[in-house]
Amino acid sequence: VIRKENEPEVMSPHDPPTLLVLYGSQTGTAQDTAQRLARQAQRRRVQVCLSPLDGYNVAELISESLVVFVCSTTGQGEPPDNMKNFWRFLFRKSLPVGSLSRLDCAVLGLGDSSYPKFNFVAKKLHKRLQQLGACTLLPVGLADDQHDLGSDAVVDPWLQAFWDKVLSLYPTLRNVLPPSFTFHFLDGVSEQTEDRLWTDPPSSAPSPSQPFPARMLSNRRVTEASHFQDVRLIEFDITHSHMEFTAGDVVMMRPRNSAEDVRQFCELLRLRPDSVFTLSATGSAAVPSRLPRPCTVRHLVESYLDVAAVPRRSFFELLASFASNELERDKLAEFSSAAGQDELHGYCNRPRRTALEVLADFPHTTAELKADYLLDLFPEIQPRSFSIASSLQAHPNRLHILVAVVQYRTKLYRPRRGLCSSWLASLDPAEGEVSVPLWVKKGSLRFPVQKERPVIMVGPGTGVAPFRAALQERIAEGKTANVLFFGCRSESKDFYFRTEWEDMRSAGHLVLFTAFSRDQEEKVYVQHRVRENAALLWDLVANQNACFYIAGNAKQMPASVRDALKEVFQQEGRLTAEQAQEMLEAMERTGRFQSETWS
């Protein structure tokens, strides 16, 4: 085999060499960088030796395989004190031209471009090593203290490029970091499902580790068919669940990946969905208790691995370690690097590309993935929370939620979908029994116990959900001083619970103000209705000790309503802007002003 000039010699992948890190440092900066490189090697389970250049027997260099030189430049282009002897030896004219032909090496210089001989030592060392026949794996790194980000602006991507090159030379190093778990596939074992976890009614309140399988009774769209937004009112049967909740509480659930995503994932990774396995930990991590034992691949992918999430940088770092295809490896390495974060943002975060779509974009690397690494690559599906939209006093043994089905477009061909809302929308109890594992958590909203104290609630869109629960509860308890500001786009398309509000108003249990933003030329929002009813609100807050609540989308609405309320205080209470702000802050401190918003 004839090696082209400056091309690395093909080494046996079975025995990666010891990495030698030699440094020449005057003030300690180069030493610190060399130590950082050595730590990176240790994390990759690479044997490493670290030494100042003058502490190393330079005659041994002829027999080394892999060396990184990290050196600074002092004064007028002079080498640091702890590499002067090495420097003199290496520049002897008597050294044979091909004496370092077995050496793969790289040079990283640390300098300051305000000096005329910027990184002179690193440049000269790099050139001399090439003259002596060494293969330089990378262009010389020229870190500059004058850069806005300091020397790390060059050091970070240079170190990443070095490891990418080393991993391409010694492929076995890609797999040196052991997986957290080992999969043991079982032959002849029938499929087990999570349903076996709830064969008996629970004896205590459901929890994250023991949710209650609530039967879905109805899943009804409550927006008009032509409306762009699909919003569902979903009802669950929680009989025998021991669930207790009050207005303001939230229900928790873990969504599942779609059948299509499960199928595609298994195809890409060449896994059989009905394969059965058990897990064992390779280190100190505990085997996830939420997974059945044994478990099927289908259940793991459907209910545990968050394959539909937008992956983080660490996903690309781990994926890069498996890549042998050069094009894919280079792109994954770029996405993993500090310098490639803008590129990664444009590829992944901005268009909301999912981990599953990334796998499809890197088919060669995906084909090399081992099942053992699945729990390292993919995070666990996290529980989602929904405001409970009903009261047990009005609907015993029932729990309602109001869910906006998230769907939007980016530059990608397929629309982006919210995992939980899309999963819930796909469930149809009319086609057969459907159960959803649930548990309840205390919410942030607290409603007054005093019967006479009024409550003012501002809940546009699905933000009205907790206020439906509050109104049902309060009316059942004889608390009738209730004011609701509800806003949506159109009276005919997304006016949630219209008949319920009208019935409450007719009975004298509710004062209702509505804002339909798109039903007239000028857009009208709930904050406008707050300003219009300044006299009523001031009387309720200042004279009747009312509590004020906001729930809904966290974009502009909460701040706009706060500002409108402060204007009410200024206008009706003759307060200065500072006094109005102080009054609102005092209400917050005492629980008379509360908000629950989400993005």
Image (cartoon, rainbow, N blue to C red):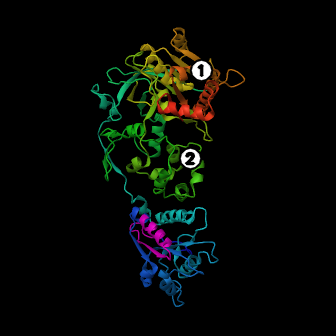
Direction bottom: furthest residue: 94
Q: Residue furthest top?
A: 507
Q: Amino acid at mark 2?
A: Cys
Q: Residue at x 54, y 90 (%)?
A: 93
The stretch drawn in magenta includes residue 63: no
Label 1 environment density (alpha carbons within 10 Å; few <14, some 14–19, many ≥20): few
Closer-to-camera residue (146/254): 146
Q: Residue at x 50, y 16 (%)?
A: 481
Quadrant of the image occupied by residue 562: top right
Residue 496 seen by the camera: no
Query: Can you tell which quarter of the image residue 197 is in?
Result: top left
Q: Position of residue 458 (x, y in %)?
A: 55, 24
Cα separation, mark 2 vs mark 1, equals: 33 Å
Which SS class for mark 1?
A: loop
- The disc labelled 1 sits on which kind of residue? Ala
Q: Is residue 568 visible?
A: yes
Is residue 301 shown above or below 595?
Answer: below
Quarter of the figure with residue 449 = top left
Residue 589 against residue 106 in the figure, above or below: above
In the image, farthest residue toward the right:
521
Residue identifier under label 1:
225
- Kindly identify which numbered label has been placed on residue 348: 2
- Compared with 447, 161 (above or below) is below
Where does the magenta region start and end? 11-39
Q: Residue at x 62, y 78 (%)?
A: 117
Q: Position of residue 33 (x, y in %)?
A: 48, 68
